[in-house]
């Protein structure tokens, strides 16, 4: 019943986006194309980290879906942007919420204040709930003032487990293989490129510190579901370094080092390592990253910094990473004007969609190998245009 309902909702969502962007097109299986990574699912169209968002992203042409992973009290990995599922301001108003927990009186006593990676936060946290309790909550749009249309889906979806995300991806892959088998036979079915998963371990040092390590259940779940070896359709990503190095000794699955344009990995803060994320983009450090990872997830400003609100002079980060043998996946491309460099804005309305395709093209021209986007439908259009122009 859940799968049938989810499919029906997803098809309805596809029709909604199709009316705005044209008919859906088949998933392209060419290995040379830049990778399209659905950031938290199709989060520009549906509340992030819901099964509906992941399914819609697949229907829109994503090569990979990206769940951020945190832990429940009983050690189950679930998909949430943060372990904080509702955050309060000092006056008690809601600053950010991805669930309805703040309105659930039965969980009022779970409100607490914690320090997560050096930041003091008051709210509700996944690690204070069992999976059964978390499943009683409902997901909400994280950016309701900006993505007002997405709020019509508030309270419709559960918080999914990582296993449920993998089940959904396998369901989609099975459907594609069946379609290929019906139309082109066994050889066609074998040529189908599977949709992959791109999980991120969130706050691994913090979760280690409270006895809910993320790495072991992540590897165990992936291996149990058949994700093994360097060629598996998965990338495991993290902003921290130590846990990726630990993972490299636990699995042969591909790893990706996330790099922000500011700050430093929190495990570096804890260990007193003076290096910043920017330092890690230097050739010698990229070579070190290549000893445990296959790629970097680079903030767009590391590749082409903004100058006066517009794209400035590209750096050598992409070329340097490639010289170290690393793939480069850029983050995060969003279509709303508020997130775009000024030259790609469509108007002064921050919520209106601008020319994300133009922004993506500038980075693909630089050699970026793939990118994370909240708008996979538009991301696929950008890749199609780029490939056609080569």
Image (cartoon, rainbow, N blue to C red):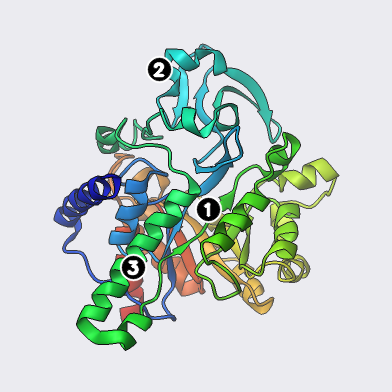
The spot of residue 83 in percent (x, y) is 56, 35
Residue at image location 36% in from the left, 67% down from the top? 173
The spot of residue 2 in percent (x, y) is 29, 44
What crowding class fits label 3: few (fewer than 14 Cα within 10 Å), some (14-19), or many (20 or more)?
some
Instruction: Judge whether residue 63 can be spotted in this image.
Output: yes
Of the two numbered discs 1 and 3 on the same chain, state the one appearing first in sequence. Answer: 3
Residue at image location 62% in from the left, 57% down from the top? 219
Farthest bottom residue in view = 187
Of the two numbered discs 3 and 2 on the same chain, state the one appearing first in sequence. Answer: 2
The front one of 239 and 212 is 212
The front one of 283 and 234 is 234
Residue that label 2 marks: 103
Between the residue at mark 2 and the residue at mark 1, the CA separation in whole angstroms equals 42 Å
The spot of residue 29 in percent (x, y) is 36, 78
Residue that label 3 marks: 174
Q: Quadrant of the C terminus?
A: bottom left
Above or below, 89 against 371 in this view is above
Q: Quadrant of residue 28?
A: bottom left
Q: In the image, is 270 to the left or to the right of 223?
A: right
Residue that label 1 marks: 307
Q: In the image, is 255 to the left or to the right of 134?
A: right
Above or below, 32 against 108 in this view is below
The spot of residue 88 in percent (x, y) is 51, 20
Name the element at disc 2: helix
The front one of 93 and 9 is 9
Q: Quadrant of the N terminus?
A: top left
């Amino acid at each position: 019943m859940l799968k049938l309902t989810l499919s029906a909702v997803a098809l309805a969502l596809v029709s909604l986006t199709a009316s705005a962007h044209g008919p859906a097109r088949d998933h392209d299986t060419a290995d040379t194309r830049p990778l399209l990574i659905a950031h938290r699912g199709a989060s520009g169209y549906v509340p992030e980290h819901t099964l509906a968002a992941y399914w819609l992203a697949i229907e829109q042409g994503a090569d990979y879906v990206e769940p951020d992973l945190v832990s429940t009290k009983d050690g189950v990995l679930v998909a949430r942007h943060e372990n904080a599922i509702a955050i309060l301001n000092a006056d008690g108003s809601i600053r950010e919420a991805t669930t309805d927990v703040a309105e659930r009186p039965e969980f009022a006593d779970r409100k607490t204040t914690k320090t997560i990676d050096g930041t003091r936060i008051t709210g509700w946290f996944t690690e204070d709930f069992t999976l059964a309790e978390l499943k009683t909550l409902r997901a909400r749009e994280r950016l309701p003032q900006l993505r007002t249309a997405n709020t019509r889906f508030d309270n419709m979806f559960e918080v999914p487990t990582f296993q449920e995300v993998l089940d959904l991806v396998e369901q989609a892959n099975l459907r594609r293989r069946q379609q290929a088998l019906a139309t082109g036979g066994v050889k066609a079915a074998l040529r189908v490129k599977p949709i992959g998963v791109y999980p991120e371990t969130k706050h691994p040092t913090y979760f280690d510190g409270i006895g809910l390590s993320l790495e072991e259940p992540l590897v165990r779940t992936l291996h149990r579901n058949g994700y093994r070896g360097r060629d598996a359709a998965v990338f495991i990503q993290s902003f921290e370094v130590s846990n990726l190095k630990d993972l490299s000794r636990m699995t042969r699955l591909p790893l990706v080092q996330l790099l922000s344009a500011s700050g430093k990995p929190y495990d570096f803060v804890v260990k007193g390592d003076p290096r910043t994320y920017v330092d890690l983009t230097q050739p010698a450090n990229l070579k070190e990253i290549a000893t445990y990872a296959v790629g970097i997830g680079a903030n767009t400003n590391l590749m082409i910094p903004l100058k006066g609100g517009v794209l400035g002079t590209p750096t050598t980060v992409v070329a340097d990473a490639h010289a170290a043998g690393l793939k480069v996946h850029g983050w995060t491309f969003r279509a709303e004007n508020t997130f775009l460099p000024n030259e790609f804005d469509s108007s002064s309305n921050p919520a209106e969609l601008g020319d994300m395709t133009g922004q993506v093209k500038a980075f693909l021209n630089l050699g970026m190998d793939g990118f994370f986007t909240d708008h996979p439908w538009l991301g696929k259009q950008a890749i199609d245009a780029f490939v056609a122009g080569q």
